[in-house]
Image (cartoon, rainbow, N blue to C red):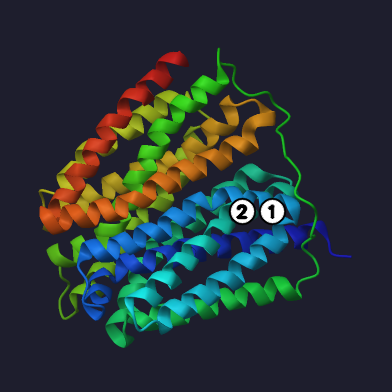
């Protein structure tokens, strides 16, 4: 019989590995946007609209993924994520028409929606000290986000964008085989996990949550719009010596996005120390000027503005998750997370088409001030949350 420590180590490894792959799969498109558009002779708007379908399924699929996980078990759902993503990535890499590419990308979004539900459920069932591990899990996701542009840029420059998807299909297959052969991670039925400590009291938890969904959804929109255009924008504005624009943009944007890992950790750490709603208002407010500034700068100023925005923007993610668990009644936490992912990823899916349309009709630099308007709108409901939580 496997020791508890060995089982926990395997759960940590597989969920972190899955979290990394999950974000890389959906971000390959952003790192190779122009080469893919050129290969199919499509506009940026057309390609980002195809991406919107992927991101929409990635979000909306959270609900059926949760049902599937509850009806079967987290390990089975995680295996399905790995094998399904591997197949979808293979199909995308082998596509020779825009239709086949669209189908492959849609399947990447659909199978990708399985990850967050199955991975977090597995952690809740099999890890005793979850706080620290959830922090590490968040860093793994940020690592995937940061690595995606560099991996895509390097492989695309050397072999073509198709090979990125083909190589990543192998990575998904490895994850599936590991779980298929593993006999230590239990295939326990999904069960609800509730903290022993009561949630923070509010006069109306449901009203509080519905109000919180507004900035969380907008934040998901900004997150997806930023990640869709950022590598391409950087590749046009900054070029490293003796490198192609795609490779240069991939390396620089990966370096900048890696700062998000620090933001993830610090956001979660500080959420235990200070009033969460006030911290949420502060971080959202700080991101606004630097996001707008990105559209009007270049060179070192663009890098500096991007670093600050990335740090604070990614710090909001563990903060949002903590707000949901702390302010909702324990019996409602699981359902609240499901709704949060649907709203955040679902609304965020439309940001790809929005960003592509803005880039085509106004210019790529206007994408970031436009996203800044969305952040400005979100500050009002966040302020209301801080007021209700006074």
Q: Position of residue 129 (x, y in %)?
A: 70, 44
Q: Is residue 54 above or below residue 388?
A: below
| Residue that mark 2 sits on | 65
**Front-lying residue, 250 or 118:** 118
Mark 1 and mark 2 in contact (Cβ < 8 Å)?
yes
Look at 72% across and 39% down and name the residue there.
193
Look at 20% across and 47% down and name the residue there.
368
Q: Position of residue 70 (x, y in %)?
A: 72, 49
Q: Identify the mark at residue 46; answer none if there is no mark.
A: none
Check disc 2 and report its element: helix, strand or loop. Answer: helix
Is residue 289 visible to the viewer in this orientation of the structure?
yes
| Residue that mark 1 sits on | 69
**Front-lying residue, 305 or 372:** 372
Q: Single out the residue that lies furthest toward the bottom.
A: 159
Look at 48% across and 66% down and name the residue there.
108
Residue 141 falls left or right of residue 217? right
């Amino acid at each position: 019989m496997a020791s508890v420590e060995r089982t926990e180590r395997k759960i940590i490894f597989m969920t972190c590995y899955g979290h990394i792959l999950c974000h890389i799969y959906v971000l390959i498109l952003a790192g190779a946007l122009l080469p893919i558009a050129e290969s199919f002779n499509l506009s940026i708007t057309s390609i980002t609209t195809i991406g919107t379908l992927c991101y929409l399924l990635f979000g909306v699929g959270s609900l059926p993924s949760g049902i599937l996980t509850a009806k079967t078990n987290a390990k089975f759902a995680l295996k399905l994520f790995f094998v399904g993503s591997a197949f979808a990535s293979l199909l995308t890499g082998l596509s020779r028409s825009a239709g086949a590419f669209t189908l492959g990308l849609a399947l990447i979004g659909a199978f990708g929606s399985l990850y967050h539900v199955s991975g977090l459920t597995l952690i809740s069932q099999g890890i005793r000290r979850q706080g620290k591990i959830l922090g590490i899990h968040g860093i793994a996701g940020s690592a995937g986000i940061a690595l995606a542009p560099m991996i895509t840029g390097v492989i695309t420059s050397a072999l073509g964008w198709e090979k990125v998807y083909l190589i990543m299909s192998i990575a998904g297959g490895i994850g599936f085989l590991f779980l298929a052969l593993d006999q230590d991670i239990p295939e326990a039925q999904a069960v609800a996990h509730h903290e022993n400590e009561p949630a923070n009291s509010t006069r109306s938890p449901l009203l509080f949550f519905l109000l919180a969904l507004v900035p969380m959804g907008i934040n998901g929109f900004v997150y997806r719009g930023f990640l869709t255009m950022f590598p391409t924008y950087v590749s046009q504005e900054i070029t490293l010596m003796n490198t192609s624009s795609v490779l240069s943009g991939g390396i620089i944007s990966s370096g900048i996005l890696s700062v998000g890992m620090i933001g993830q950790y610090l956001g979660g750490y500080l959420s235990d120390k200070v009033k969460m709603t006030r911290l949420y208002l502060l971080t959202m407010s700080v991101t606004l000027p630097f996001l707008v500034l990105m559209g009007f700068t270049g060179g070192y100023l663009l890098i500096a503005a991007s670093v600050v925005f990335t740090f604070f923007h990614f710090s909001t993610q563990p903060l949002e998750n903590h707000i949901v668990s702390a302010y909702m009644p324990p019996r409602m936490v699981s359902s609240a997370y499901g709704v949060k992912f649907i709203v955040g990823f679902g609304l965020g899916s439309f940001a790809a088409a929005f960003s592509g349309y803005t880039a085509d009709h106004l210019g790529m630099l206007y994408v970031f001030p436009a996203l800044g308007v969305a952040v400005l709108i979100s500050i009002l409901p966040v302020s209301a949350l801080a007021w209700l939580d006074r």
